[in-house]
Amino acid sequence: MSKSRVLFTRILPDKVMDEADKLFDLTIRDSAIPMTEEEAIQSLEEYDAVVPTLGDDFNAGIFPKVNNLRCKILANFGAGYNHIEVSAAKDNGVTVTNTPGAVTDATADIALSLILMTARRTVEGDRIVRANQWTGWKPTEMLGAHVTGQTLGIIGMGRIGKAIAKRCQAGFDMKVIFFNRSRVADPGVEATQLDSAEEVVAKANFVVVAVRSGPESYHLIDRNLLSAMRKDGIFINISRGDVVDEQALIEALSTNQIAGAGLDVYEFEPEVPDELKAMENVVLLPHLGTSVLAVREDMGMMVIDNLKAYFTDGNPPNRVI
């Protein structure tokens, strides 16, 4: 029996590539940048399955341009799939899967890193030392914000939100409040669900957004929500960049409407606005949320499990649609 033709749009860890090579007629795209529209169209015409990832744009306008659609499954590498128009895929008979769960702990760890780095000004301090500008310890130098015992506000209490809450409460004795579109019966820790995101951000010292990207969450963090934050509030984003109106965030930071921000994702990444780069009260990471070898291997093996199940009985375990 011939093997299914599968395209991986990026090189994944060796463990994943070796397993994929055994199972499929494998093609690995030799580029680290997102696919062009022409490549996306061609992939849908030439492969039984495509394994896209962040930035590989399969929008609604792609599918009408495809001649003789061959691809039956987009097995996304990543929990977030805002780069795939899932309704358009469904309308064209293409299944979409993702890799939830594998990313939870690593992403929650990055959220904790950003909270501490931003509150305690660690990146700013590192720069001062490296530039030979540190003249010695002073009682009033580099004063930051306290983390222990403060109030954490979480927007989106799914797997990752719960993991962040657990770490903050157990490790830093933080009070946890949160907003979620649906009621959360068991947040996993002692936490209070409030009726609106505005209520959460108005009461929290630290606001972490951990929602899934999609039409319903596009620019969820806008001018109105940022203006409701405390003046000493610190904003953290580890979800997806387009959840935040980036220009509104820049305005809130530059006018001291909020105290600081820690960002791992950006609205138009890999582009990061120069205004953010110039701010000392902002910590910027290059989308490190899942940057752990074991996690990337787990994500890749989950992709393979989705592909194997689809080609066996058409029922992948992590079906989005």
Image (cartoon, grey):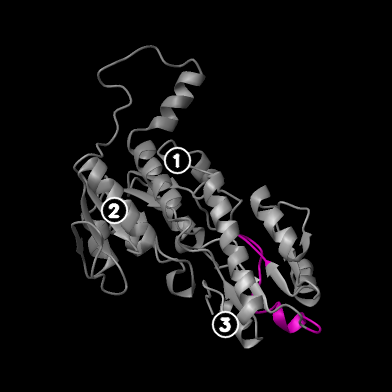
Front residue of 301 and 153? 301
Which SS does the magenta portion mostly show?
loop
Badge number at residue 165: 2
Looking at the picture, which amino acid does disc 2 mark?
Answer: Ala
Left or right: residue 201 compared with residue 112: left
What residue is drawn where x is 45% and y is 58%?
239
Looking at the picture, which amino acid does disc 1 mark?
Answer: Val
Left or right: residue 208 compared with residue 84: left
Looking at the picture, which amino acid does disc 3 mark?
Answer: Ser
Give the Cα distance between marks 3 and 1.
35 Å
Say which label, 3 or 1, has the lower sequence index: 3
What residue is drawn where x is 40% and y is 43%?
114
Front residue of 281 and 304? 304
Question: Helix, strand, or loop for circle 2?
Answer: helix
What residue is drawn where x is 61% and y is 81%?
313
One can see residue 291 in this view: no
Left or right: residue 279 compared with residue 64: left
